Image: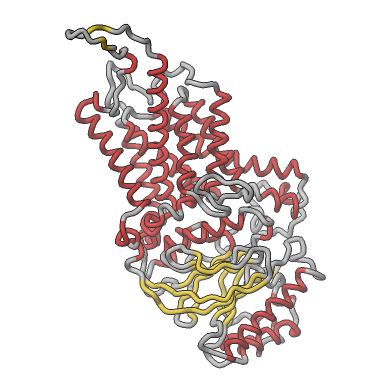
Amino acid sequence: MSRRPPGRSARGSGFVWFWICLLGGALQAASIAWPMPGWSLPGTALGQPSGFWQIASLSLLVFALQYATRVGQAAWRGWVFSTAWLAGTFWWLFISLHTYGGLPAWLAVLAVLALAGLLSIYYAVAVGLLCSWAPVSRTAQALLFASLWTLAELARGHWFTGFPWGAGGYAQVDMMAPWAPLVGVYGMGFLAAILAYALASLASGLVRRVSAWMLSPVSRPRRSGAGARMSAPGPRVQARVVPGLSDGWWGLSRTALLLLAVAGLLVSMLGGGTAWRTLGHRDTASTGELRVWLLQGNIPQDQKFEPGTGIAQALSWYPQQIALAAQANRNNPTTGPQLVVAPETAIPLLPNQLGAEFWTPLLGSLADQATGGTSALIGLPLGSMEQGYTNSVWGMSPETAARARDRIGSPATLGNGVYRYDKNHLVPFGEFIPPLFRWFTDLMNIPLGDFNRGGLAQPSWALAGQRIAPNICFEDLFGEEMAASFRDAATAPTVLINLSNIAWFGNSVAIDQHLQISRLRAMELGRPMLRATNTGATAVIDHTGQVTHQLDRLTRGRLEASVQGRSGITPYAEWTARWGLIPMWVGCLLLVLVIASLRGLGRRGGRTRRR
């Protein structure tokens, strides 16, 4: 993408460009949720996203690519940027591998870097193709870059089960909020890539013009007809002020198109009025209030599955809170909680491993209520050695709890008639072991297993006038899978609930990153998202993505809140429910094919100028 012919060195040494890409990647990671409590850049706050710095950091990569003269050089710079970005995003995997998994520190670091490096191949291929097919037009270059970059994001998020954690669009959850219910996280990433290209082009244009001025010869002054002394600029500084102007009306129109697109994006992010900012949610409406208690047990991960500590705490504290919720509802049915939610694997044992001394008081506290009393949503493992295991959720109303209490003596039928959700998108290495990697998991001291998958678009739970759709752990990373439940507006969920256990990753930025992911899902689908977690972030997010209530991380307690359910379908939910992300794939691929096939337009003297 350089103006110089291939084979000639780009301005600046490879060492300098390496550090620019490394810095850009690290800044891209930090833009999703600022991780440093003691220091911050302007416009950043601890744990919060920064759309501006995401665009600025990506523009550093584009800037480096504009001075690349060989495809391999461009691919290397893209790989360095992406490896720094991804390793800086999910570095906290080191905590689960080393602190809780028992891997030696050096091997845990190597595993994180290897994962980041492998996933970065998608982006290296993308920028390699960009520099191989770069057209003359800056507008076409911007669209080609955005399309290829988005295709790399889609590939990372879906191929080989997918791991889209840290996609660039999540940093835009505030700046590009109106776009979320229209185009989703990948569409927001596409728009951010266009702005990053525009910013990098502006910077490189200024650098070239300053360099041309600094290197231009000083011309001798000459006299005008009136005797005044004048100085004429040398030919080197007579650069085009408006790119494309010397190419005629076609070049000018291309430049104007890019400028208008950038201006439109800036207006949509910085203003646009109420009509624009509420456009994506205009077809949604309130379905009434739901009063909830969200429980946060704060059980350390190294104790969670230990009989004398974590298991004992869980089997005592969570049933106690459910009993208190039921009592609060009995005391005042108009203000007491209608639903209490315990996080993922809040009960860390199988139902048949728990005797009547556990189930009798738990089920009794729910069953001994009038119809419409407090219900409970509880994370727990289910299954058997013969049938396989699932990471699941049970939903128990007073009626179903009463029927289950009558079957306490028959553990195998205890869950009959109880609402059940089974996790569909499993965590690689945690809930299933990829082929050829058994040797790696054998090195760790973690209770791992091959779990069964639940179905896609499982039925919602009808409760208190709402349709509740649970999701577990990182399932809320996959908006297109959650949107599968929105095919029919009459049965679509009105409230989303995420049950998680992020204790595996300690007191790290993973907590903040996951909160931003949940915020974006709420915005895309136009639904409130409730989060019940073991260590944080336990929070209530409304349908516009605003956090209305939040519990302090790493504390034991409950979050008491009310939330408004929503009906109706957002544009994103509508097209994604029908076609998944196929329109995004097809649109980006078509742009790539069209631009690549027409990249020769604008040739002069039989040669294409690379920029």
Task: Find the residue positioned furthest to the front.
Answer: 227
Which residue shows up at 37% across the image and 42% down it?
A: 589
Give the position of the N terminus as an image quadrant: top left
Q: Nearer the viewer, residue 104 or 354?
A: 104
Which residue shows up at 49% across the image and 69% down it?
A: 496
Give the position of the C terminus as an image quadrant: top left
Q: Picture coordinates of residue 584 (x, y %)? A: 38, 49
Which residue shows up at 71% across the image and 50% down it?
A: 97
Task: Find the residue positioned furthest to the right.
Answer: 308
Q: Picture coordinates of residue 577 (x, y %)? A: 40, 62
Q: Image quadrant of residue 564? A: bottom left
Q: Nearer the viewer, residue 208 or 123?
A: 208
Say whether residue 194 is left or right of residue 605: right
Q: Picture coordinates of residue 131 (x, y %)? A: 43, 29
Which residue shows up at 68% across the image and 63% down it?
A: 554
Looking at the image, can residue 390 be seen?
A: no
Say whether residue 118 is left or right of residue 524: right
Q: Picture coordinates of residue 42 (x, y %)? A: 51, 45
Looking at the image, can residue 275 be seen?
A: yes
